[in-house]
Amino acid sequence: MFDAKRLLDQFLGGSSRGGGFGGSHPGQAPYGHAPSPLEQVARSLGGGGGKAAVLGGLASLVLGGRRSRGGFGSGFGTPGLGSTGRLGGLALVATLAYQAYQSWQANQGQNRAPAAPARAGGFIPSADEAAAMLGGSRFAPASAADEQDRSRALLIAMITAAKADGHIDAEEQRRIFGEMDRHSLDADDKAFLMDALRAPVDVEAVARLARSPEQASELYAGSLMAISVDTPQERAYLDHLARRLGLDPGLARHIEATLAAAASQR
């Protein structure tokens, strides 16, 4: 069975054996310490050129590497952020979106910059801190099934955003699949990733995944983490996505500023 939470944790450097909204695991390696199988795939593709770099760019950025041009996502999933108590991928995105959402609500009607982080240590919490921060809010999954659904939605949003300024042709798909086959991705992971990579860029489909304003904020935050926002196509994609998600322009700006500030703390 496809485990979207586990795959999202791999994308964002968390542990497949925990690190969701629950407690931390003392003694484990720092967040993002070991390269995931998908990061290994990205490294294998890194020198290949062509549009296969879409996957390489996505994975090397979102899985904890760095695209040469940097961006919102380039500070996430790296040892430079220190240990987050094995914070899971969904919890990471949710806490960042939550902080941006709270800052936006507090400043509605006022032309203010986003507020300082909600915790003294910065924007990136440990798993325990994330659970306390989000407890009782609509940013916390209501159930294990909800956690799976939201993780899957984030994966789709990130992969779609990563394709905003390019596409992958059939030959490159075969090459990518061959590289995946050499690493420890299971059949369900491969099927999900290849379906997502083959799918056309569809902003409407991503927007339909949002079941609440809070989840809309998460999807926008996850999309930002997948790209560098340094091409007209990427900027246009994000602006279109924000509109279709029904995000207030001020909230979208707060999300962007929060992610940029969090990345600068690495």
Image: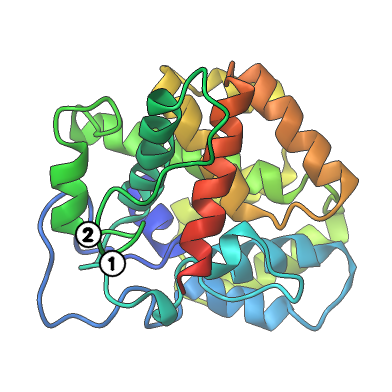
Q: Position of residue 162 (x, y in %)?
A: 70, 51
Q: Residue at x 18, y 80 (%)?
A: 28
Q: Is residue 27 above or below residue 114?
A: below
Q: Position of residue 121 (x, y in %)?
A: 27, 65
Question: On the rendered structure, is 67 left or right of 260?
Answer: right
Q: Which residue is mark 2?
A: 19
Could one spot residue 79 in this view of the protein? yes
Question: On the rendered structure, is 120 left or right of 80?
Answer: left
Quarter placement of the N terminus: top left
Q: Nearer the viewer, residue 75 or 165?
A: 75
Q: Nearer the viewer, residue 77 or 186?
A: 77
Q: Number of labelled discs? A: 2
Q: Is residue 55 above or below residue 46?
A: above
Could one spot residue 3 in this view of the protein? no
Q: Which residue is mark 1?
A: 15
Question: On the rendered structure, is 237 left or right of 133?
Answer: right
Question: On the rendered structure, is 96 left or right of 72?
Answer: left
Q: Nearer the viewer, residue 83 or 248?
A: 248
**How many residues crowd around disc 2 within 10 Å: few (fewer than 14), some, or many (20 or more)?**
many
Q: Is residue 49 above or below residue 52?
A: below
Q: Position of residue 139 (x, y in %)?
A: 30, 32
Residue kind at label 1, given as amino acid type: Ser
